[in-house]
Image (cartoon, rainbow, N blue to C red):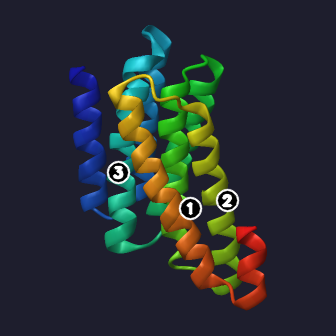
């Protein structure tokens, strides 16, 4: 636990120094080191926090912060899928969707459309994994539905006329 906190602080420091690649390496190494000695579930629960650290950097400074946030979420999704942890997989897919949507806002029209379609696919897959058994699932479902709505809105604004209708059918 202390090692994870230290790595997180070092990653935040790397971002302050303008080095998102180093921050990504530190956060990824932290997650991987815990997977080797413990159940993957506790560290996978930290991934959304790691994702937010990198995404916030991308929001403030541009660069590859969004892509690194997407990659850390993809890595978590792969691990969650291997252990059949559907809630964590849904959270990771939601993070991937957020990263793709954020990237689309800084892209040209064609790339924005492609990224919007990818983010919508991730949100829909995340929703398909969730039930409504627990309060946490209902809350996560609500967040993903909100993100899905925003994804469709972004898709609608990046396309025109008949092309927009084709995506919504």
Q: Secondary structure at mark 1?
A: helix
**How many C-alpha atoms fall within 10 Å of the one at disc 3: few (<14), some, or many (≥20)?**
some
Mark 1 — residue? 100
Q: Is residue 108 visible?
A: yes
Indicate left or right for 58 with 149 as reference. left
| Relative image position of residue 68 (x, y in whole percent) | 50, 54
Quadrant location, the N terminus: top left
Q: CA distance from mark 2 to mark 3?
A: 19 Å
Mark 2 — residue? 118
| Relative image position of residue 17 (x, y in whole percent) | 27, 62
C-beta proximity under 8 Å, tags 2 and 3: no
In the rendered structure, find residue 57 and report the number of the disc placed on it.
Answer: none
Q: Nearer the viewer, residue 30 or 106?
A: 106
* Residue at screen point 44% across, 9% down: 37
Above or below residue 31? Residue 124 is: below
C-beta proximity under 8 Å, tags 2 and 1: yes
* Residue at screen point 54% across, 54% down: 97
Label located before the other in sequence (2 or 1): 1
Indicate left or right for 146 with 135 as reference. right
Mark 3 — residue? 52
């Amino acid at each position: 636990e202390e090692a994870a906190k230290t790595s997180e602080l070092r990653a935040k420091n790397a971002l302050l120094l303008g080095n998102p690649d180093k921050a990504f390496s530190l956060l990824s190494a932290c997650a991987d080191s815990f997977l080797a000695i413990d159940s993957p579930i506790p560290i996978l629960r930290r991934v959304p926090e790691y994702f937010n650290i990198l995404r916030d950097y991308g929001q403030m400074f541009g660069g590859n912060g969004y892509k690194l946030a997407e990659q850390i979420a993809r890595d978590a999704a792969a691990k969650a899928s291997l252990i059949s942890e559907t809630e964590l997989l849904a959270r990771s897919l939601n993070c991937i969707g957020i990263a793709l949507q954020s990237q689309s806002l800084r892209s040209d029209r064609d790339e924005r459309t492609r990224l919007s379609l990818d983010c919508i696919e991730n949100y829909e897959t995340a929703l398909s994994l969730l039930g409504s058994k627990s309060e946490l699932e209902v809350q996560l479902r609500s967040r993903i539905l909100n993100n899905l709505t925003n994804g469709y809105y972004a898709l609608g604004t990046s396309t025109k006329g008949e092309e927009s209708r084709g995506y919504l059918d």
